[in-house]
Image: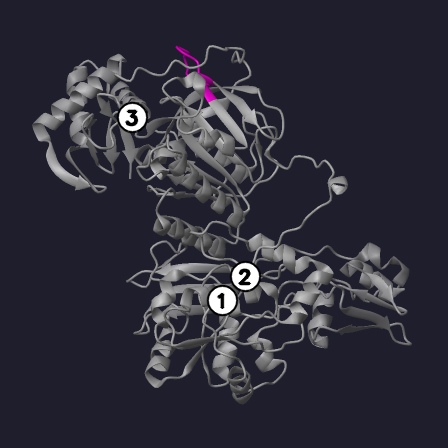
């Protein structure tokens, strides 16, 4: 019975021809992808001692040590009590297995990739670091000089006319290098082919070496698409490997093939000029049709939208019969509020806490905290594109983290700049590259992308034009398709807030969910209602009350006198959600007493200290924030305490930013008037940008 007990403990146990089969526990089994189909045979000899054999090639020593490590081989006096004495598998920290340095032509390290052994079903994980000019490592690839692996060898291959073998990963590239050939790869693996490295392949003879699966051949297609116009010639070779997911490493070390074998295969492979000429091996397509697993993996990497890097050769469609389609439960991201993989619009007039609500949604998705009393069903990473409000976002984040005790390392990632998703292919590709780098570095699935605001991601287009709005919707949909995530666009209400979203009606038609924020006029502290005005799947018309709580968070995220106050969204069931009047938009003239003083102070300070500066691509008469603040302090009067001044200053900045009456860029600020190209139909427009 011992063989059966061990097999049951290992998982996926089944009896085949009188012998027990189970999942192999070796962490590196299947290149670290685990043993999905049982390949470990567990038997007993005549003395009742267990015997093991892994049919996928794991050594006896590896198997024995793994089983022993899990406590499945104790010397038990009573075999019948075996399962009751098994010790639990202890969680272990990842162990660094290998580190690869990506260097420039002079051998100076530009970025680093690390592979870690993990003790879970996945078996491995990766980390990447940018290296600065002082040799310091940074756990972000933003700003890194992206180069291909073993760049100096590529330069030597160009000079000598030798072929370069392009692999999916560093381990496979090192295997080919070990037999005397030049080999390289990119830091992103199969996820995409970074356009930053294309320039290094100019004039090279390139041989792409895919892994033995459809994902590998999809990567080959992406590589050929990117390199076909710059290389001297390009081939895609089939190493004719036996097991799925094997690569050049097995070609060299498992099948004992050498450089001559590789050269013979290469010579027998024709040169191609386009990715459409790639012929995927029949054995892989046959395996796909039998199991469907590879197709699902490909679909997970599929990209739509002509502006994004290709993810595979062709998208697969499945037609379903009318009678076979059944009603499926809604897959919620936030229960009753936002479905998974949905396109959501969050809108309101200025100064209605749109960005505060969006930031609260991001924190809830990342941590699992309830959003206004609604359960978060699926947590994950959030990408927040902050096209405006950069200067105040730091204090908002600190206040949110302090108030809700947000755990350190919560996966929310900010892009603090404007991105043109309407008409700039370059911006879209740069955004995709940044997100791909994030996924490769952090190994976290993206559940939500937030665009704050749509206007700042519109590239100066006409929101009322169907062509311009359609182009934005297409780009948004392409991002959703690529990352299989939800997308939330923060947007403004029209002149008449009761008529909904500003701009062309195609936006309302495209969104799955429309969330309207209704600020309750005159409420102290500020209160509002989140109204689900459209829900394609689920119930619309629901209303949730909230109030804004002031929090003062210092630089360390703790309450202190030196901190700047900000607001935090808090659910409030006491709010009268039956208020059907809706918002009265804030006075665009800045009618509050402190707001009037702040605006007058701004113009007075510009008159005294203003200087012409070109900032963010625009030329304006600017002043320093400290100059505006000093003028504001003077105009408030000498009887205002330091604490009251601090609170008033922070509030008027936030209010005027929400009302769109000033532009703040780092330590600079300026007023934008009617005659400026980007001005709206108000006397002066204010926004906060980075």
Q: What residue span does the magenta drawing correspond to?
A: 517-528
Residue positioned 73% across, 71% down in the render? 64
Q: Secondary structure at mark 2?
A: loop
Looking at the rendering, in which quadrant would you find the N terminus?
A: bottom right
For disc 1, the marked residue is 275
Q: How far apart are the alpha carbons under marks 2 and 1?
A: 8 Å
Q: How far apart are the alpha carbons under marks 3 and 1?
A: 48 Å
Q: How far apart are the alpha carbons under marks 2 and 3?
A: 46 Å
**Who comes first in sequence, dot 3 or dot 1?**
1
Membership of 19 in magenta stretch = no
For disc 2, the marked residue is 313
Position in image of residue 523 (x %, y %): 42, 11
User: Are discs 2 and 1 less than 8 Å apart at CB?
Assistant: yes
Q: Is residue 317 above or below residue 590?
A: below
Q: Is residue 4 visible?
A: yes
Q: Is residue 505 above or below residue 262?
A: above
For disc 3, the marked residue is 660
Q: Is residue 207 above or below residue 590?
A: below
């Amino acid at each position: 019975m011992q063989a059966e007990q061990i097999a049951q403990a290992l998982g996926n146990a089944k009896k085949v021809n009188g012998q027990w089969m189970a999942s192999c526990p070796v962490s590196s089994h299947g290149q670290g992808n685990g043993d999905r189909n049982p390949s470990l045979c567990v038997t007993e000899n005549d003395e009742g001692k267990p015997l093991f054999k892994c049919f996928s090639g794991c050594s006896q020593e590896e198997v024995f040590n793994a089983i022993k490590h899990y406590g499945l081989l104790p010397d038990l006096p009573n075999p019948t009590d075996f399962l009751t004495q098994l010790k639990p598998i202890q969680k272990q920290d990842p162990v660094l297995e290998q580190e690869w340095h990506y260097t420039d032509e002079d051998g100076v390290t530009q970025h680093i990739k690390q592979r870690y052994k993990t003790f879970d079903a996945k078996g491995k994980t990766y980390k990447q670091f940018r290296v600065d000019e002082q040799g310091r490592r940074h756990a972000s690839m933003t700003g890194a000089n992206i180069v291909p692996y073993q760049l100096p060898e590529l330069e030597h291959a160009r000079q000598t006319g030798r072929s370069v073998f392009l692999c999916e990963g560093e381990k496979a590239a090192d295997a080919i290098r070990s037999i005397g050939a030049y080999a390289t790869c990119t830091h992103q693996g199969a996820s995409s082919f970074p356009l930053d490295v294309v320039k290094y392949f100019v004039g090279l003879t390139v041989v792409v070496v895919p892994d033995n699966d459809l994902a590998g051949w999809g990567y080959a297609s992406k590589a050929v698409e990117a390199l076909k116009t710059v290389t001297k010639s390009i081939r895609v070779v089939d190493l004719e490997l036996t097991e799925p997911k094997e690569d050049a490493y097995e070609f060299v070390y498992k099948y004992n093939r050498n450089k001559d074998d590789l050269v013979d295969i290469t010579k027998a492979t024709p040169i191609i000029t386009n990715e459409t000429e790639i012929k995927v091996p029949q054995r892989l397509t046959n395996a796909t049709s039998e199991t469907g697993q590879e197709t699902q993996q490909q679909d997970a990497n599929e990209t739509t939208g002509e502006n994004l890097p290709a993810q595979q050769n062709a998208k697969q469609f499945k037609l379903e019969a009318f009678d076979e389609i059944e009603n499926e439960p809604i897959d919620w991201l936030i229960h009753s509020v936002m479905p998974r993989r949905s396109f959501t619009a969050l809108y309101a007039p200025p100064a209605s806490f749109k960005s505060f609500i969006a930031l609260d949604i991001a924190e809830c998705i990342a941590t699992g905290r309830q959003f206004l009393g609604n359960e978060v069903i699926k947590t994950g990473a959030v990408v927040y594109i902050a096209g405006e409000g950069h200067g105040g976002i730091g204090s908002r984040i600190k206040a949110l983290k302090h108030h809700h005790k947000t755990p350190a390392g919560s996966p929310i990632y900010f892009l603090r700049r404007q991105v043109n998703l309407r008409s700039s292919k370059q911006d879209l590709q740069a955004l995709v590259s940044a997100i791909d780098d994030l996924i490769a570095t952090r190994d976290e699935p993206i559940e939500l992308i937030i665009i704050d605001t749509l206007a700042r991601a519109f590239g100066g287009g006409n929101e009322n034009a169907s062509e311009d709005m359609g182009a934005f919707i297409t780009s948004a949909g392409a991002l959703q398709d690529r990352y299989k995530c939800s997308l939330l666009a923060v947007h403004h209400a029209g002149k008449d807030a009761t008529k909904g979203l500003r701009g062309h009606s195609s936006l309302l038609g495209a969104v799955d969910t429309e969330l309207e924020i209704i600020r309750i006029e005159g409420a102290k502290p500020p209160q509002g209602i989140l109204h689900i005005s459209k829900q394609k799947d689920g119930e619309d018309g629901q209303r949730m009350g909230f109030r804004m709580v002031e929090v003062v968070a210092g630089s360390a995220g703790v309450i202190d006198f030196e901190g700047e106050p900000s607001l935090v969204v808090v659910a409030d069931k006491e709010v009268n959600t039956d208020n059907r009047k809706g918002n009265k938009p804030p006075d665009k003239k800045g009618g509050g007493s402190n707001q009037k003083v702040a605006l007058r102070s701004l113009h007075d300070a510009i008159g005294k200290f203003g200087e012409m500066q070109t900032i963010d691509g625009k030329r304006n008469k600017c002043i320093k924030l400290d100059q505006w603040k000093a003028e504001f302090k003077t105009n408030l009067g000498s009887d205002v305490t330091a604490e009251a001044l601090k609170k008033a200053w922070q509030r008027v900045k936030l209010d005027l930013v929400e009302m769109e009456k000033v532009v703040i860029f780092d330590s600079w600020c300026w007023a934008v008037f009617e005659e400026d190209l980007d001005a709206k139909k108000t006397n002066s427009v204010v926004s906060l940008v980075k």
